[in-house]
Image: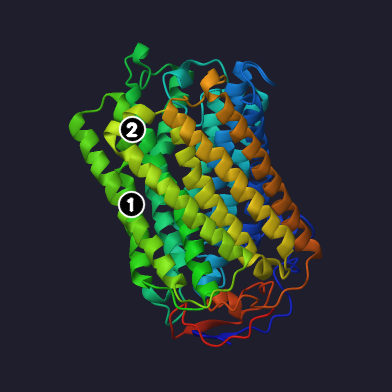
Amino acid sequence: MASHAIVETTHEENYLQYKGRHGGLWSWIFSTDHKRIGILYMIGMFAFFVVAITLGLLMRLEQLTMGPTIMEPSTYNKVFTLHGVIMIFLFIVPGITATFGNFFLPIHIGAKDVAFPRLNLFSWWLYVIGAATALIAVFTGMADTGWTFYVPYSVRTGTNVTLAVLAAFILGFSSILTGLNFVTTVHRMRAPGMGWFRMPLFVWSLYATAWIQVLATPVVGITLLLIILERTLGIGIFDPALGGDPILYQHLFWIYSHPAVYLMVLPGMGVVSEIIPTFARRNIFGYKAIAYSSVGIALVGTLVWGHHMYTSGQSYTAAVVFSFLTFLVAIPTAIKVFNWVATLYKGSIRVELPLLYAMAFIFHFSIGGFTGLMNAAISVDVHIHDTYFVVGHFHYTMFGGTVFAMFGALYYWLPKMFGRMYSQKIGITAFVLQVIGFNMLYFTMMIMGYMGMPRRYYDHLPQFHEGHIIATVGSWFLVAGLFLMIGNLVWSVFKGVKAEDNPWGGTTLEWQIPSPPPLENFDKIPQVDRGPYEHIPVEVSK
């Protein structure tokens, strides 16, 4: 069955059964096994995800009517700040990298674990410590600044910004250490015969993402530390009242935070690059172009931060340069979309839930990318800056892109991770609800933003009332689909039908070992002799 490697696995004990020196819960939280660490990240992140979507639903309910509905203005500010902090720092940034990256990167390259297993466990503990710090901040006066912590307000407000910023700082260290681990793993742990262009494209996306984590995250870490120093010691770095420069903060923040957009979405692109050739039953079209485009996005994506600051007073020359670079970064993204569609063209397509989510990713991210080009145009951006249009654009790329790709990864790899299948009917029902609700919500928000609806506002004018009703109803569909999907997946893990080792007919290394995987993945390191997507006739379970 092996299409590109000689794989030997005879282990009877899988990673879920292994107890080691500890028993029960301790065998998990002290485990250095990359697969268990990936599962721990997944449990934590989806717990926070449920909290974040609940907060988002409360925000939409508040906007259902004009004037006060369910909360006060000050509470609304704290709710949208907490929603953003959780979704960005605790869910999407670690996201696919920390969960599926940890679980499958070593398996994809034929290794038994990551290069530094103990450092990997330490990264997870830093994530837990950062999350705990954020929870303490919630119960001691949650920040009301928005997730960007813009100065000078963030250094003057009486809410507990210091702990919230400290939480983000700690989470940044977790991200940096994970990136270092992944870069080293890809360079040093590949199986014999696995050259750079025999790696799965998911590995390429994780590799490009890891470099962003290593090089860009320290910038925002130091910036957040400076906010803490300014709030506690009164050092005038960003506050103009103390001789500081608030525009400097924006530069330092977005130097990280726009590359972070690609840090969030590149792994999702890698997931799509795995799903499409499997269900199209053919080799990926333009393998090298997709691989190089991942690196190209990581490189050019670090140079475009100034498009967030067209209205800040930066020079016209800087604005034009940033506009050009922003248009340029769309090219490698378009290369990926073209090659995905070309792979599907005349393929023997098998329609399954993972493929549906991959197609939803392409559709939503294309809309997000096109509206991103609108934001890149200076003359347009000055009118839609800080409106609902930007909120809609951001969610089309991050939620419609990254999160939908994560859901596709869940359905794609769930049989391998837990050895169980999910309910197809419930999964499709949840998918339809999510797509309908998502587009009702965020496309309506983009229309309202184009008409002038500002972001972050607690209330709205009468001309936006119908739009808010449509968007809020859309959020109900979306949340219903999300909870239905989560219930389906949780049920499947414990009660689902037992899965075959290779239910999709995949050709990468994870499909050539038992489900769930053995503790050390392989008895012997595999010998790779072909590319990752070279399909041969494989018996596929019905």
Instruction: For mark 2, give the secondary structure.
Output: helix
Please name the residue that numbered disc 1 is placed on: 330
- 302 left or right, relative to 345: left
For the residue pair 140 and 474, the one nearer the viewer reads as 474
Question: Tag 1: Cα neighbours inside 10 Å, few (<14), some, or many (≥20)?
Answer: some
Residue found at x 42% / y 31%: 450
Q: Quadrant of residue 407?
A: bottom right
Residue found at x 56% / y 68%: 113
Instruction: For mark 1, give the secondary structure.
Output: helix
On-image quarter of the N terminus: bottom right
Q: Are marks 2 and 1 in contact (CB under 8 Å)?
A: no
- 393 left or right, relative to 470: left
Q: Which numbered circle lies on residue 381?
A: 2
Residue 316: image location, x then y, percent:
20, 30
Q: Quadrant of residue 337?
A: bottom left
Looking at the image, tell me whether mark 2 or mark 1 is earlier in sequence order: 1
For the residue pair 64 and 245, the one nearer the viewer reads as 64
Residue lying at the far left of the rendered structure: 317
Q: Work out whether residue 98 can be spotted.
A: no
For the residue pair 273 and 143, the one nearer the viewer reads as 273
On-image quarter of the C terminus: bottom right
Q: Which numbered circle lies on residue 354?
A: none
Question: Tag 2: Cα neighbours inside 10 Å, few (<14), some, or many (≥20)?
Answer: many
In the displayed structure, 73 sits above or below 382; it is: above
Indicate the amino acid at tag 2.
Answer: Asp
Residue 49: image location, x then y, percent:
64, 43
Q: Quadrant of residue 496?
A: bottom right
Residue found at x 43% / y 80%: 531
Residue 12: image location, x then y, percent:
73, 80
